[in-house]
Amino acid sequence: MNNKIFGKKCGLRVSEMALGTGNFGMRWGYGSQADEAQSIFSRYVDMGGNFIDTADGYQYGESEELLGRFMKRNREKLVLASKFTTGGSHIQNTGNSRKNMVYAIEKSLKRLNTDRLDLYWAHFSDNQTPMEEILRAFDDLVSAGKIVYCGFSNFPAWRISAASVMADIYRWAPVVGIQIEYNLLERTADRELLPMAEALGLGVAYWSPLAGGTLTGKYRNQNLAEESRKKAWGGVLVKEETNSQIKQILSHLEAFGKALNLKMSDIALAWLRQKDRQNGLSSCTIAGPRTLSQLNAYINALNITLPDDVMDELDVISAISLGSPHETIAEQQVSIFGSKAIEIKHKVY
């Protein structure tokens, strides 16, 4: 498994595929039993993976507890990331306040049986806590040695960009990366988040690369869909086949899979990895397997390279409308500079 520097704001070396551990445990009523989770973890590390992603709310803390047991022998070889925002049991222990961050980091460190986190994410924007408060709290945790780097998961671009600039101006701990949902069925990050990450030199971690399993094709049989969705994070991440674009994407994946002798998931994952190279971003894909066979499928896909024509066609059929002001700007560039200038000045992700 290849390694890369996670963005331009740090020297952190991470593997090209992170291990998402939201399925480690059974407290949500579904997931991986401890033995299966141990097998997944061991296989990932044996294959050269080093980037572990968890959160205080995953399986109500069981994910972190299991990782604390699994990492005893190789903690220093790993990049350990966790998140806070939603893991508390009452209102004082949720959100992005300094109070909750201080509470959450102590609980996570205890469950993970470690003295620090290598990367700490604010999990979700609460749309209330000032970014200055979050940044100062992150900076204090870095100074105290309890975290090494910080970043934002599921925040709007305007908040992240403001935070990144403030951290640089005031010489607080830099914002090194973002974590976002991105896949063939969810490309709205093309509007603001990915251009922002490139401009600010942020690393990018993609969650739900298979759209909760939809891009594997296993939900196309409607007779099986309802029961299957219950096992996919409660159906939260599953993209319904509800419009013509989704149907077209899945049909193309199926057709390309037959032509190239690949699984639909292989093509979806390879597209995401190659898309990253085209964009010039420093990113990694977060795999969230529930079984060892699912992890093996993620690993096998790392060796697949899609033909250019397949990449181009998938890019076109999965593209979203960039909306205003992007399309207005593009129209003005065409009228003023001509179509050749648009190719240079209006980069579409």
Image (tube, rainbow, N blue to C red):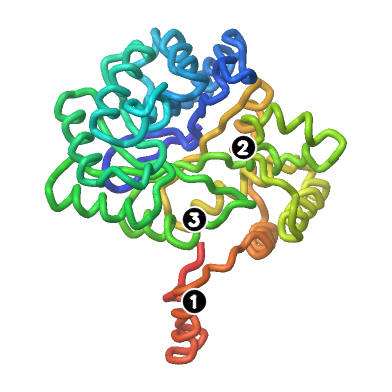
Query: Which residue is more in the foreground, 243 or 335?
Result: 243
C-alpha separation, residue under disc 1 versus residue under disc 2: 37 Å
Could you say which quadrant of the image residue 116 lies in? top left
Question: Residue 118 at what x, y percent from top left?
Answer: 31, 27
Q: Earlier in the sequence, mark 3 or mark 2?
A: 3
Amino acid marked by disc 2: Val
Judged left or right of residue 176, residue 3 is: right
The residue under label 3 is: 189
Identify the residue at image location x=44%, y=17%. Answer: 64
Amino acid marked by disc 1: Glu
- Image mark for residue 139: none
The residue under label 2 is: 236
Check disc 2 and report its element: helix, strand or loop: loop
The residue under label 1 is: 343
Check disc 3 and report its element: helix, strand or loop: helix
Identify the residue at image location x=81%, y=43%. Answer: 220
